[in-house]
Amino acid sequence: MPAGTNRAFKLPARYSIEGRVHKNAIKQLNRAAIHEEFAVGSKTIKRSSYTVLHPDEGASILIADRRLTVTDEPIDVFRCRNWDAFVGGSSELEGEWLTPAPTRFDLLSLSQASEARNAVLNGWRGAFEFREEKRDGDRVIETGLRPPQIGALFGVLSHWKTSSLPATVVMPTGTGKTETMLALLARERPSRLLVIVPTGALRDQIGDKFVSMGLLKELGALREDAPLPIVGLLEHKPKTAEEVDAIFMGCNVVVTTMAVAGQSTEAVQRRMAELCSHLFIDEAHHISARTWEAFRGHFADRPVVQFTATPFRNDGKHVDGKVVFNYPLRKAQAEGYFKEIRFAPVDELDQVEADQAIAIAAVAQLASDAAAGFNHLVMARCSDIKRAEQVHAYYAALAPEHAPLLLHNGISAGEARDGLARLRRGDARIVVCVDMLGEGFDLPELKIAAIHDPHKSLAITLQFTGRFTRFRSDLGEATMIANIADPGVGEALQDLYAEDADWNVLLRDLSEGANTRQARRSDFIDAFQDAPDVVSLRNIFPKMSAVVFRTGTRRWRPDRAIAAMGSTEIYAGPTVNERNKVLLFITREHDAVSWGDVRDIRNTEWHLYLVHWDEEQGLLYINSSNNSSMHEDLAKAVAGDDAAILKGELVFRSLHNVNRLVLTNLGLSDVINDRLRFSLHVGPDITDALPEAMRTNKRKSNLFAHGYEDGARVTVGCSQKGRVWSMMTAEDLASWVEWCHAVGAKLRDETISTRDVFTNVILPVEISERPALIPLLIDWPEEFLKRAEDAITITIDGESVLFFDVELQVLDFTTDTPIRFRVVTPNKIADYIVRFAPDGLSYEPQGAFAADITIGRTTRSLGDWFRREPPAIRFDNGGYLEGTELFVPPIGAARKPFDRDRIVEWDWAGVDLAKESQRVEKRPDSIQRRVLDRLLATTTEDEFPIIFDDDDAGEAADIVCIGVRDGRLVIHFYHCKFAGSPSAGARVDDLYAVCGQAQRSTHWRSAVPELFKHLRRREDGRRAKLAAAGINHVSRFERGDLRGLRDLGKQAKLLLPEFKVFIVQPGLSKKALLNRQLDLLGATELYLMDTAAIPLGVIASE
């Protein structure tokens, strides 16, 4: 290296203390890595010449290729490991500092290590200053901590003065959570701080921040001469408490992951908590409840702070703790900490085409940004390793000049470090990864996000987005590229993945909406006084259950509750929410074991007690996991001696307004016969038991049932002793209170007759022979309908199609011939027959082909699937068959013939009544075409901007109309059917199939988002099919297009759906209709109204 010149060099950091203890790194920084200009000189030692770098200030640095000592002058010695590169002109030096040599931590005794730690604490005394940044627009005129950092700092400090509960700090990614932690460390001078992070990569990154104390000195918040902390990076689980001592004793800060801390032994965790005075959690939304609760239990008496970009965990639950500071994303955007985002959508339903389109857009954006002078990088996000490998291949072929990287947990730590180093140097400009760069990764040049697989939750989306919005003056705006047709986008994120989405507004609104919901729940929880430390109220999810009491008191007395519990041990609580009139406590009870007379062994049971007084209705609700009592003493203590349990017949009022009520079990008590006091009836046995219950010498003891209420499926259980319950679990304590109010309103309603409730119960009958009923439709098993339409594949004769292109059709509308049905796909059919036998039903193929069904990785024959999960066969009398159980509606059920006057007559002149479908060629003389022409002529685009031809196997209806009216999403289904004769008449056979199709429509009432996806798939499916056949596309949209459908879909989740189903059968004569046909139409409308609150319209001939 020639002397007498000036050159810039990069040299690594030097440490005062450094070493490894049980494979865990521990270090204290002396001087950070430097990149500055030096005067280059030389020095000869033992006839060898060495380069010497002379800085403007401080000691000179001798660069050596071997170990040596300089004794004749004060000089620092750096041993260069990349000597050849240095000699060849490289300015980036790698190696180790020989002098001054760091103290070896692993050689220190425990007392020496503790002394070093204490020296740092003493050096911090009075070294921290609350210094806040001042700005003039975007220009910083006085350095200091940012306003959100100051706010979070004061929020935590004030919380610690009044509460020992965990504190939660909510700050959007990029607003300075880490600097807030550092400020708390310097201000509070904790004896020892433990920091928990979700991943090893973030452990290393956060650890480096603590080592240097970040920007605190540069900002003037920490005195320049203040010592830097001794930081341990706990990478491996300590095996013993002694190993914990060896690692922790000399550290001011220990940074680790929950995987290490949470999976250590109980003794090791306990020792960690004994040594650490404070606990911080970073990216707290990643910590699962079970892992976190178990570990945090050791820190019950220590200050705990959780830092997160969102108050929701990945599993959708709330981050525990009291929110002491919540910095809104709106304010972060306004103050310039969260920069603008540009959204670049692609629109592809096929995943391969979507991946290619996203990759092309990302590479083009990279080139565009480079042309504008911005040194940006692309990150392509994938959900798993297999997907990442597929996507990486696209980028490698498309842009080899950018050397695309592939990073995931399947590669070694060394490969990951090398890849990240290449990315930081700019040797690679595209990285494809599986959640490797999301958790706190700090690389501001990441400005282009190619989202091949969207995140499922808002929490992770907010955290992920923050990686791309970090501010730096030499960088441009962030760009998000995603597929707006991706079916994997969760409902909470659908607005983000819309064609014209403004992520800057939507992320802000979604974040604030989530935080507001959390705040409301927090307000409910925070209203509890003296909440217990041993259990978080946010983690209590009670069953929807209660014993209900009528009260006459004007004041409840929760302070008297514990006295009513007698000698029962109160483990936690009592705690009272006076605002919402809720009392909570937890008991610990010890009972004898059931398997012997053993005094020294007892069962320990933990029971939750919830008490709510509904002042408006005068009712008291008690929920307890202890069902051995009705808790009358507790009720009288809280609500007065006149508190009376609501029991007996009126409890069954809770079944009111539940349509299609099906009892799954029924308990009866005999009020006369002491030898037969109680009998329990299940399934078909209930059919004989219920009429018996209506007699005077029997009374209903308890029952459980399911049905439909307000168009949704519900479950209800009740006992004449006074308990009411549901199979639901409350998502929080507030939800349980709301459920109680709904139940209480029914129990107090004197107009409800329980005899009327039981008059309309649908009773099951066990059968082994074909019932003498006419089948209207065979519907897929309920579990099939709950799945996404593209999650099930049907294969017939080697041709596989997705579920949305498949239909089940009844073949024979008779009472006595075998029940046959057909599986129909666009190109194939498979016929089946239902066989009845004493050992159950079977579904056997008839003819040349059979169908196979694939769900996930499991493929079975249709017959095998249906034996395991029976389809529902619905009959003309309103009953249905599932497996061997026939559910028969009562004779006295509220059903009546369809009103003939409500049938609408149309003129069908020029229509061939035998032609139902218009097909692709749009046959002008078909029934469907006539209906479409009339709808297009009689409705406006404002009424129905979407009119869609969905005709074909798997249809929702032949015609679907969608619009918005008076704040409601209006959806009309038209089911068309050809006639069995050229002229209109009174043929009941013309109604069976179309009534079955109409009843099938109820599925969509609770699946509106899926309906929009279904229509999109149908349009794309037809386009692909016609293209494969070389035919120009003929759209299914008779009015509107995909853009309009998407716009309505965005509005759909904000609107109340209003469905109406129309049966269109020109083969029916309104004048000639018989009672049998009107009964069938009446039964169809009753089913639609009971299960989905959908009215029926009928269109026929004169």
Image (tube, helix red, strand yellow):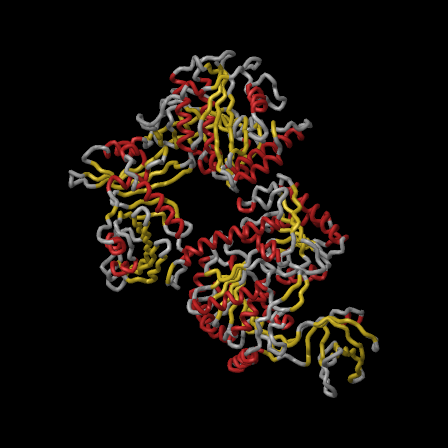
Q: Which residue is painted at 43% across and 64% down in the image?
A: 165
Name the spot of residue 696 as percent of width and height, x first: 19, 34
- Residue furthest top as drawn: 983
- Residue furthest bottom as drawn: 72
Name the spot of residue 716 as percent of width and height, x first: 34, 41
How many numbered dots are placed on residues in this image?
Answer: 0
Q: Which residue is painted at 65% across and 27% down in the image?
A: 1034
Quadrant where the image shows the N terminus: bottom right
Q: Is residue 330 left or right of residue 59?
A: left
Q: Please state which of residues 818 and 792 is positioned toward the viewer in this rendering.
A: 792
- Residue 652, image quadrant: top left
Task: Give the answer, above or below, for where 368 lies relative to 657.
Answer: below
Q: Please state which of residues 146 and 304 is positioned toward the viewer in this rendering.
A: 146
Q: Which residue is painted at 39% across and 37% down in the image?
A: 709
Name the spot of residue 194 as percent of width and height, x first: 51, 69
Q: Is residue 282 left or right of residue 57?
A: left
Task: Give the answer, above or below, for where 73 lies relative to 259.
Answer: below
Residue 706 visible to an observer of this rendering:
yes
Q: Is residue 917 left or right of residue 659?
A: right
Residue 23 visible to an observer of this rendering:
no
Name the spot of residue 525 as percent of width and height, x first: 41, 57
